[in-house]
Each structure stands twice: as structure tokens, then as C-alpha cells.
Amino acid sequence: MKKMKMNQKYPSCNPKAKEQLYKIGMFANMNRVTIKTLRYYDEQKLLVPVYVDEENGYRYYAAGQMAQLHRIIALKNMGFSIDDIQKILNGAEEKSFLLEKKQEILKELAALTEKLSQVEGYLAKDSMKLSAPVLIKEIPQAIVCTMKHRIKSYDALFELMPQMGAQMEMLDCKCAQPAYCFTHYLEPGYKEEDISVEICEAVTEKKQDSGDIVFKVLPKVPTAACIFHKGSYDTLHKSYAMLLQYIEENGYEICGNIRESYIDGVWNKETEEDWLTEIQIPVK
């Protein structure tokens, strides 16, 4: 057997072949797309065949075009329009498009997350034996007349509110419509006594502060977990417990003063069973 010498040149057994071309059907199957899709990309000048047979109109693609096709598919799956894809393929800065798309997707995710929270709130209604579902919502900005006090017990609120109403009448305050009367709890945690509160009543305009009465504009609360409580204030702690459990289980964090909004009460309802209070907890 003849021996080969070191570094001896010999002809390659795989001479370089011409670039392999694939008919449109084969190229579509190789890349898991439809023939219709490839024709559409051709019409839009996104991916033009390297060769078209003049006699029969058959389109032929090269293996090197796979990378371009995969890029188009990736951009389309991200939600880019054909116009945007054309701009990117024609040399526009891809990163700026991607950053803009990222912000768009984050906004969509936030909106979907809010919807999911509302669904969870309705599901929790039955599992947690709630009289009403937890609702995640925005609380609008409000001009309020306020009065701060440290009270011995929650019963003292019934004495303070009429006093505040009398002072508001002397100042010729006009309550906003719809009415929005609520109590801010200014310290974290639940306390049975020595409670720091701020009683608030939404009004149509700010007046000059007078005595205990202070006027302010409360900014909107972008996100608040809210629940309606029907019945006596003596059982409010049960609704609080359920709402706080919902907040914890759904990954929220309390980020503001808790509000108790008094919708119906002793002033317009004959029995405690008809009293209606909304607990509002700012969250993020």
C-alpha cells in the first residue's frame, strides 16, 4: 500500500458545491411556516426568494435566508407590526424599538395583572365567606375638610363627627357629591384604644382653616384594595382580617393610610344591619 508523505497535497473528497436552493414548500416545512406566510413576506419585501423560475413562477430560497426568516418570526411574535419589522430590517436601530416594545408590554402586563386581581377578588368572595368581593381600584383626588384627634376608643367617633359637622356648617362648607366621608387611621396596626384618627369630609372648595378644622387636597390613590362591610361597626375587624389576608396572599404591600368610608349609617338607616362601610387600603 502506497504511503502518504507528510504535508503531501491531495484533492478534496468534498469539492465546494453550489449553494443549495429549496423550493418554497420545502423551505416552509424546514422552518415550520406556511407557504402563504412566505408569499406574504415576499410581497412585503421582508424575505425575497433568491431565485424565481420565469417559466413556472416557482420560488427558491437559500439556506442562508433561514436566519433572516427566524428574525422576522421573532419580531412578529414580540408584537411588532410589518412596518416596524421593515424599518428594523432596513437598518433602523433595533434596540430603541425593543425598549419601546418592552414598555408597551409592561403596561399591558400591569393592566392584565389588575384584571387578574379582580378575578381573584371575586373568587375569594366565596372561599373567604365575604359579603362582597375585594375590588382593586383607583381612588380619585379629593378636596377635604379634616379634623385630627387622638381618641380613647372607636365609639368616640360618634361624638367627633357631629362636632365637625357643626363647625363645617359655621364655615359654610358644601359637601361634594357624591358624598365621601371617611376616617384616616394615622398609625399602623390595629389598636383598641389611644387611636390617632383624621376625620375627612369631601367638600367642593377649600376654606380658611379654623380651630381644629384644616382643609387640604388629598392626591388620588392609584391602587387601593377595597371591600364593602355590611352591618355593625363591631364586626368591622372581620372584614379587615379578610381584606388584609387577600392583600398578603396576592402579593400586595400596604403603602398608605387605611380609610373607612361611611356610606350608610345611623344618620340614614334604622337598623345596624343596613349600615354600609367601605374599607379602602392603598397598596402597591
Image (tube, rainbow, N blue to C red):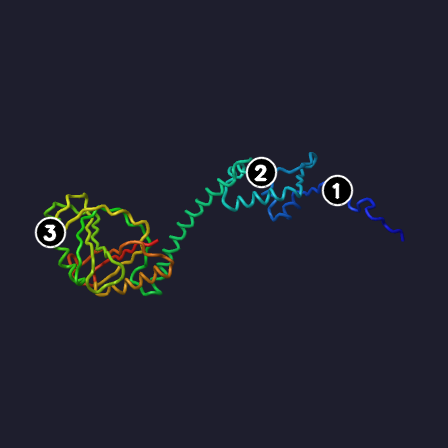
User: Horizontal and vertical percent for residue 143?
Assistant: 21, 46
Identified by mark 1, the residue type is Ala
Q: Residue 252, located in which quarter of the rendered image?
A: bottom left
Q: Answer with left or right where residue 131 lies relative to residue 79.
A: left
Q: Secondary structure at mark 2?
A: loop
- In this rendering, which labeled residue sits more in front, label 2 or label 3? 3
> Eyeballing the image, is 91 above or below 269?
above
Residue type for callout 3: Ala
Q: Quadrant of residue 119?
A: bottom left
Which sits earlier in the primary sequence, circle 2 or circle 3? 2
Per the image, the residue denoted by label 2 is: 46
Gap between marks 1 and 3, in whole Å?
A: 98 Å
Task: Depth check: give the residue in front, 233 or 268.
Answer: 233
User: Which mark is on residue 17?
Assistant: 1
Q: Label 3 crowding class (10 Å Cα cut-off): few <14, some 14-19, many 20+? A: few
Q: Which residue is mark 3?
A: 166
In percent of the image, x 85 and y 48: which residue is there?
A: 5
